[in-house]
Image (cartoon, grey):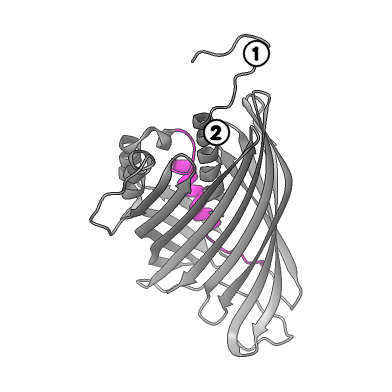
């Protein structure tokens, strides 16, 4: 790659700005991946519960708007994505279940300046069109029908997450992005699965009790996003005994890569969400999480301000 001479700043072209927007959309999608009895005021120990042979079907819907200001111009990209997937419970022993997750359908819509609209539906007969189609369609098609295996204990902690070699090979053949350390890489896919679980505390909970967790999401070529999550137990739903509510707040930090040519600083972040958990059935019924994050990127002396709003909804069908 030809670089500018020392002291000369290379201008950020619309093509380069588009690549940066796309890179950060992938990082945010990976985040964005990343989620009993009548309890009243008493203590309750919440646990996931599984039965061998059962199938749980979920729908995850995400919508995101990203605005970037660079070179005195504003660029706005919108994304909506709906993923249908299911869990098959293979076995249960010692409060640990062996499960597989299979993606059944993917619907994606991206609208970006200079690139028009990209729409993809894995169930559609007509092929997707537009500048993103050649890059994304093969990768999204490879995900449909893919099976991931993992173990989950009764607190919702995941272990032994495995991506099938067949899927990884399909992704590698579909495009170079699978080898770039992003959402479609092996680590990226494992991270998305990890973010979809709700981890419960070991001790009994009373209304107002809080617990926390931290996770890290690699951002290709830039660094690592650090998510600090705080959960608050809201107690049971008086109108629906056995259903409990959990509130979530999230703060996002960043650990930069020392050798990155793109410098990123988080100016502000705010995340909040609500989970509905079936204490009797031992499973999540649904969740709604909203995130707002403001970043500042420095790319070869060019400063780019970026603001992203995302909402993710998970539903047990």
Q: Which residues are magenta?
A: 180-202
- Image point (38%, 65%), residue name: 86
Please name whichever residue, 75 or 46, is drawn nearer the observer in this view of the structure.
Answer: 75
The residue beneath circle 2 is 17
Q: Residue furthest left?
A: 125
Q: Position of residue 24 (x, y in %)?
A: 56, 41
**In the image, is residue 187 part of the stretch drawn in magenta?**
yes
- Is tag 2's residue or tag 1's residue first in the polypeptide sequence? 1
In the rendered image, which quarter contains the C terminus? Answer: bottom left
- Image point (26%, 49%), residue name: 127
Q: The residue tagged with tag 2: helix, strand or loop?
A: helix
Within the image, what quadrant is residue 236 found in?
bottom right
- Image point (64%, 23%), residue name: 300
Q: Is residue 32 above or below residue 263?
A: below
Q: Position of residue 152 (x, y in %)?
A: 50, 61
Please name whichever residue, 154 or 93, is drawn nearer the observer in this view of the structure.
Answer: 154
Please name whichever residue, 288 or 110, is drawn nearer the observer in this view of the structure.
Answer: 110
The 10 Å Cα crowd at callout 2, few under 14, some 14 to 19, many 20 or more, is some
Q: The residue tagged with tag 1: helix, strand or loop?
A: loop
Instruction: Tell me, yes or no, if residue 204 can be seen here.
Output: no
Instruction: Tell me, yes or no, if residue 254 can be seen here.
Output: yes
Q: Is residue 299 above or below residue 224?
A: above
Callout 2–callout 1 Cβ contact below 8 Å:
no
Within the image, what quadrant is residue 54 found in?
bottom left
The residue beneath circle 1 is 8
Q: CA distance from mark 2 to mark 1?
A: 19 Å
Q: Position of residue 279 (x, y in %)?
A: 57, 79
**In the image, is residue 12 part of the stretch drawn in magenta?**
no
Q: Where residue 217 is drawn, which disc sits there?
A: none
């Amino acid at each position: 790659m030809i670089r500018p001479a020392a002291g000369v700043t290379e201008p950020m072209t619309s093509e380069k700005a588009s690549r940066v927007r796309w890179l950060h959309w992938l990082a945010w999608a990976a985040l964005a991946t990343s989620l009993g009895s009548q309890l009243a005021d008493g203590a309750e120990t919440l646990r996931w519960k599984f039965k061998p042979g059962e199938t749980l079907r979920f729908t995850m819907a995400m919508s995101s708007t990203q605005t970037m200001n660079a070179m005195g111009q504003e660029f706005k990209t919108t994304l909506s994505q709906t993923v249908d997937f299911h869990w098959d419970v293979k076995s249960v022993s010692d409060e640990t279940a062996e499960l597989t997750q299979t993606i059944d359908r993917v619907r994606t819509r991206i609208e970006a300046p200079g690139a028009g609209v990209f729409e993809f539906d894995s169930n559609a007969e007509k092929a997707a069109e537009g500048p993103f189609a050649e890059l994304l369609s093969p990768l999204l098609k490879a995900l449909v029908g893919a099976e991931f295996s993992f173990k989950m204990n009764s607190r919702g902690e995941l272990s032994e997450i495995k991506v099938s070699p067949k899927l990884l090979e399909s992704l590698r053949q579909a495009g170079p992005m699978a080898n770039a350390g992003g959402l479609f890489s092996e680590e990226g896919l494992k991270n998305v699965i990890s973010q979809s679980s709700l981890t419960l505390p070991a001790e009994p909970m009373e209304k107002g009790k809080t617990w926390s967790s931290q996770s890290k999401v690699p951002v290709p070529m830039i660094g690592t996003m650090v998510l600090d999550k705080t959960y608050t137990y809201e107690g049971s739903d008086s109108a629906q005994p056995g259903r409990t509510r959990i509130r979530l707040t999230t703060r996002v930090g960043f650990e930069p890569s020392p050798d990155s040519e793109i410098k990123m600083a988080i100016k502000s972040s705010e995340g909040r969400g609500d989970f509905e958990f079936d204490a009797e059935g031992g499973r999540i019924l649904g969740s709604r999480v909203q995130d707002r994050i403001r970043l500042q990127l420095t790319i070869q002396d060019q400063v780019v301000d970026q603001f992203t709003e995302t909402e993710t909804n998970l539903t047990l069908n």
